[in-house]
Image: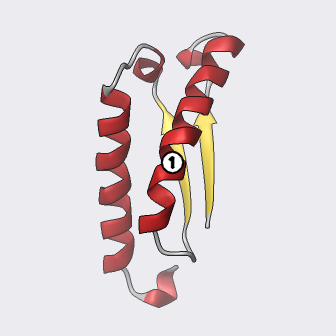
Amino acid sequence: MRVGFIVGRPVGNAVIRNRVKRRLRHLAAQQLSSTPADVDLVVRALPRSATAGPDLDTDLDRAWARATTRLAAQPAVAR
């Protein structure tokens, strides 16, 4: 499984972008055990993620669950 992160300039300066990436990387690591091994996910951080508190964890959990559910519903050929 691979996870990629897109944190663009609208999120903030380099320090803030790296902080957001570190937070997302930490939160994504907690989700890996419940995700199929043959999946590649890309997480795109929106500008609001720079100021998100504990909501970032909840938002990522919700988005991760929705993405894996949609992926499971697709035929295996489309992957």
Q: Is residue 31 left or right of residue 5?
A: left
Q: Position of residue 56 (x, y in %)?
A: 37, 30
Q: How many marks?
A: 1
Is residue 34 or residue 44 the one in the foreground? 34
Q: Residue furthest right?
A: 14
The structure residue drawn at horizontal position 49% and vertical position 82%, both measured from the top left corner, is: 78
Q: Is residue 45 above or below residue 76?
A: above
Is residue 61 or residue 67 the one in the foreground? 61
Is residue 42 or residue 62 the one in the foreground? 62
Find residue 65 and report its image quarter: bottom left
Q: Position of residue 47 (x, y in %)?
A: 46, 20
Q: Is residue 28 left or right of residue 2?
A: left
The structure residue drawn at horizontal position 54% and vertical position 70%, both measured from the top left corner, is: 39
Q: Position of residue 30 (x, y in %)?
A: 47, 51
Crowding at dot 1, Cα within 10 Å, few <14 / some 14-19 / many 20+, comes out as some
Q: Which residue is mark 1?
A: 28
The structure residue drawn at horizontal position 48% and vertical position 42%, both measured from the top left corner, is: 27
Query: What colour scheme has been applied to the protein in the rendered image?
Result: secondary structure
Q: Is residue 35 left or right of residue 13?
A: left
Q: Is residue 54 left or right of residue 17?
A: left
Given the image, on which type of amino acid does mark 1 rest? Ala
Q: Is residue 25 above or below residue 31?
A: above
The structure residue drawn at horizontal position 39% and vertical position 87%, both measured from the top left corner, is: 75
Q: Position of residue 13 (x, y in %)?
A: 66, 10
* Label 1 residue SS: helix
Find residue 3 and report its image quarter: bottom right
Quadrant (top left, top right, bottom left, bottom right) of the N terminus: bottom right
Q: Is residue 6 above or below residue 70?
A: above
